[in-house]
Amino acid sequence: MAARFFASFCAVVALSEGKWFGEKGERLGELAQYMVDNWRINALEFHDNNFFTSEKRVQDFCRALIERKLKLSWWGEGRVDTLHKYKDETWALMRDSGLKMVFLGAESGDDETLARMNKGGSQSAENTLSLAAKMKRFGVIPEFSFILGNPPEPERDVKNTISFIRKVKRVNPNAEIIMYRYDPVPIGGEMFDAVTKLGFEFPTTLEQWCDPKWRQIQRRTTADVPWLTIKGQRRVSDFQTVLNAFYPTATSRHIKPGSWRYWLLKIVSGIRYHLRLYDHPVELTWLQKRLTYQRPEISGF
């Protein structure tokens, strides 16, 4: 496990030094069998940051699940450019073995921003759209994460990423969208240099690290950051509320696709979404609370 590419926003790669290690597919099948036999599990989540690095290993794992007739649902994390290269036969095998959803770091719909992030590989906005279409064809839900408010033009980045997310939803309405605010990590690079020039700096003492303000920054519970305005952050939050109402997550335990709750959210949010009226969606926030809406990054598959 671990991350292989040195993305400028990723803290995991600094710990793994870009190395990746994986159990053999057959061994994973044995472990799945053991958990079914001993704990009667019906689903698996793999939190390896690059579970799909080896296509052959994934094929072996899928065959092991099918041959053992385990009938498990499973979820994993992967890269857009890696899975974009997978053969259709592998996608069919993954689907038949029980793969339901894949978490994918799309990060941005702008190739220049992806380059600044140092995503590595061959990731591009076009690959993200293409993969969204392929996963729709095979009935596997893509769970795309995006980072908004990236330097050097955070406000413009928010606007462009929102537009790209709408494109993704047109291609695959079932795609889950998870949004994060850009926050720097101390590994240097163009983006880190940009926020440093704006006055951002990491704590240098234990007392500073324990300061309530810094804990809020770490948890993304404060808008007091120098690289993205409060208005820009509110724009992200408001859009997320409208998007989640118009496209309710398929993973919610309380709002099932096709249910009256599902259609109520879509109808009430429809005008806002189609006319791009995202500001202050108080009625949707109220409705989501009343219907016990769960965001995709919280409810799981």
Image (spheres, rainbow, N blue to C red):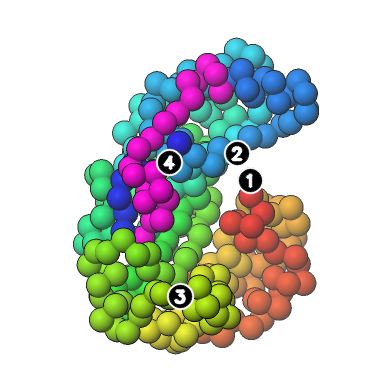
Q: Secondary structure at mark 3?
A: loop
Q: Quadrant of residue 74?
A: top right
x and y percentages locating residue 134 in the rendered image = 40, 39
Q: Position of residue 285 (x, y in %)?
A: 66, 77
| Mark 4 residue type | Ala
Three-letter code for the amino acid on which mark 3 is drawn:
Thr
> Residue 88: x and y, percent?
39, 27
Q: Secondary structure at mark 4?
A: loop
What residue is pinned by disc 3?
Answer: 205
Q: Depth-wise, is mark 1 or mark 3 nearer the camera? A: 3
First of labels 4, 1 by sequence position: 4
Of discs 4 and 1, which sits in the foreground? 4
| Residue ID for mark 1 | 301
Q: Residue 57 sits in which quadrant?
A: top left
Q: Which residue is mark 2?
A: 45
Separation (CA) of disc 1 from disc 3: 40 Å
Does residue 175 appear left or right of residue 84 in this picture?
right
Which residue is rendered at x = 31% and y = 77% of the image? 195
* Chain part drawn in magenta: 9-28
The residue beneath circle 4 is: 2
The answer for how far apart the CA atoms under marks 4 and 2 are is: 15 Å
Instruction: State the separation of the CA atoms marked 3 and 2.
Output: 37 Å
For marks 4 and 2 on the same chain, the one whose residue lies earlier in the sequence: 4
Residue type at tag 1 = Phe
Q: How far is mark 4 from mark 1, CA to CA? A: 22 Å
State how far apart marks 1 and 2 are (Cα).
9 Å
